Amino acid sequence: MEHVLTTRECIPEELEKTCRKLAGERGYTFATLVVEEADADWKLSYIFYGEGKDSPVCLVVKTKGETPMIPSISADVHAADWHEREAEDLFGLAFEGHPRLGDFVLHEQWPEGTSPMRSGFSDTAELHQELSPWRPQRIVNTPGAFMMPIGPVYSDYAESAHFLLETVGEDVIRLIPRFFYKFRGVERLAQGRTVEDALLLTERFSGTSAFAHSLAYCQAVEAICEAEVPPRAQALRVFLAELERFRHHVAALSEICGSTALAVATSQMAIIEEELLRLTCRLTGHRYLFGMNVCGGLSMDPGDDICRRICDDIDGMVKQLMSLQEMLRFTSSFLDRIEEVGAISREKAVDYGLVGPIARASDVVRDLRVVLPYGYYQDESVPLSIPSETEGDGYARLRILFAEAVQSAVIMRSVSSALPQGNVSPASFSLRAGAALGWVEAPRGASFCWLRMTEDGHVIRCRLTPPSFTNWHGFHLAAENFAFQDFPIIMATFGLSNAECDR
């Protein structure tokens, strides 16, 4: 990656003003908050990214104390809201001025005062807590108001998540989400592991975007070690990333059709998805691309011929998708359920820092493959343009998914027709101590991985910020002021993963 972090130290008293200037006047987007602890010394890194030639900016705030007080920036940079709440729960930090801390990652079964990311926390100690009933914070107080719970247990394969819908009639007035029912502590588990072992953790916390997340991690390691990735490996990484994007978008389209009770269209999309999973397995040996990324390259070379044959098969699938899209365009019962439903304005999408197809459906034309190009995406031969829509509703999100799926097929064909020759296995490189930020445009949007490692290749801190964590924060914008029966459809058009939050 050509872009490197521009790091600036910032005193706590200047943090709010500096962040306000970055996000407001300069139009930067908040990416992530990285908390690092060393004894009683704290280092907080607030990372923002811009567009074009602007490098990501890292504001470093240093402070001391057992439970230091840090100014909250969420009033001016609303995208930082959940990041501060997460840091408060996991590290025991206090963010002055934040309107709602606590009851976020750690639910009622965790003893009060537990901070699982602190250095003094024991991974093996038994936690004893007398469970008390959880009572949600009620927002709507008016005669006839009631709260309707959805989740946390669902049928099929959906991970746990709980949504409270407040109303006085049929329309949702307020939506309160609650995740982390299966908090897995991936970042904690990564500490002290070798970079190879930690790669397995980052790859597996969300199987549907396994290649993208592992690529962000590998790029962080490669940046620290100044490792040269072979050109053929870089090109094949783009090929595989677009294959994952294509498969994800087909699955998301299937979910949207299913949410509107179009059984035939749902089945047809699901058949295409299954065919893609089988193609992926034939190409790499795993249906979800596990084990392909290694630091410095790829674990195997599938070969030119099979890549081209895969593209031939995908061309046929694109024709099926285009036929399905045309039929959906003229299915009034379908359009009535998603058109002008779940709309998010461009201003709100920017305020919440939304990413991926959801943001692009609201005319936020931002894609890390373009604004912060990495790897082979920097090559001018990659035919990449960013589709966008302006309505910000469910139908706009559907059109973005179709457009991006077709573009992924075009990119795969272009890359496979001119693959560089050579090895894909990593050339030898020396492990080094240091820290770096890796990023990718995952199928659901911008994904970031901050890594700090020792000289002998052990992880000190690994911070993962997947797109679902970013976009679930803004989901209520789409669900509120729409009818109850719209809720599952709006959720399907978002196409997010609960597991990416429960990392």
Image (tube, rainbow, N blue to C red):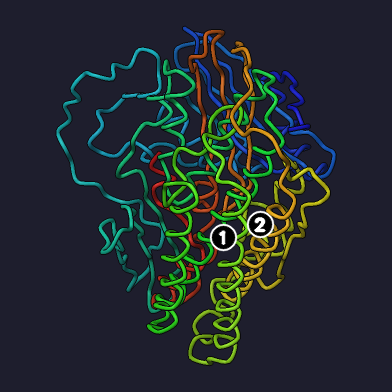
Picture quadrant where residue 385 is located: bottom right
Question: Looking at the picture, does residue 410 appear above or below residue 396?
Answer: above
Q: Residue at x 53, y 79 (%)?
A: 338
Q: Amino acid at mark 2?
A: Met
The residue type indicated by label 1 comes to: Ile
Check disc 1 and report its element: helix, strand or loop: helix
Vertical order, 162 against 458 (above or below): below
Tell which circle, 2 or 1, labels the residue nearer the N-terminal end. Answer: 1
Q: Residue furthest front?
A: 305
Quarter of the picture holding the N terminus: top right
Q: Which residue is mark 1?
A: 310
**Circles 2 and 1 in contact, beta carbons < 8 Å:** yes
SS at badge 2: helix
Quadrant the C terminus occupies:
top left
Q: Which disc number belongs to residue 412?
A: 2
> x and y percent of residue 396 in the render?
63, 73
Q: In this orientation, which residue lies closer to the viewer: 364 or 408? A: 408
Q: Position of residue 77 (x, y in %)?
A: 65, 42
Q: Residues within 10 Å of mark 2 (few under 14, many from 20)?
A: many
**Percent x, y for residue 189?**
37, 25
